[in-house]
Image: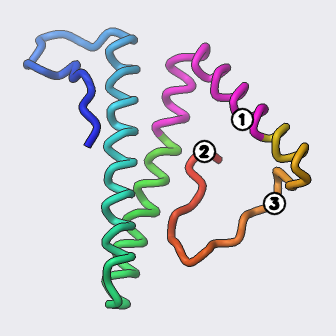
Amino acid sequence: MAVLGNPFGAVVPRKLTNGELIQAIREDIVGELEAIHGYEAHVMATDDPLAKAVLSDISNEEKAHIGELMTLLRHLDPQEAEHFASGQAEVREMMIDLGINPDAQPAAEGSTVGSLLK
């Protein structure tokens, strides 16, 4: 489990600064990733079809939360958004160099794990 600084270490009678909010959003993203990891581990550890369906659905909802949080993070920190875009461009370039279509959807390989950074 990741351990990050907590801007909510004590009840603070004030609004968060933009920097504190950005850090809180990052911590929220970590929490969502940990939840996905746990749910998908449980899916892989059972043969019960209902459990697999419910846990997969919950995991997918957490992935949507990551998309929401990443969008908010990009809004709150435009400079960080530029870094994300730069990283995405680098990977797209590598894919093209390797003959991989960067716009093609990869086939699932027996896992519920999906793309997090679309």
Q: Residue 104 has which mark?
A: 3
Q: Amino acid at mark 3?
A: Ala
Q: Which residue is denoted by mark 1 in the rendering?
A: 88
Count of residue discs: 3
Q: Looking at the image, is 114 positioned above or below residue 66?
A: below
Which residue is painted at 31% across and 61% down in the image?
38
Between 46 and 52, the one nearer to me in the picture:
46
Q: Amino acid at mark 2?
A: Leu
Question: Do tag 1 and tag 2 residues touch (Cβ < 8 Å)?
Answer: yes
- SS at circle 3: loop
Q: Callout 3 environment at 10 Å: few (<14), some (14 to 19), or many (20+)? A: few
- SS at circle 1: helix
Q: Which residue is denoted by mark 2 in the rendering?
A: 117
* Mark toward the start of the polypeptide (1 vs 2): 1
Q: Callout 1 environment at 10 Å: few (<14), some (14 to 19), or many (20+)? A: some
| Magenta stretch in the rendered image | 69-91
Which residue is painted at 40% across and 20% down in the image?
22
Which residue is painted at 87% across and 49% down in the image?
98
Q: Quadrant of residue 82?
A: top right
Q: Residue 108 has which mark?
A: none
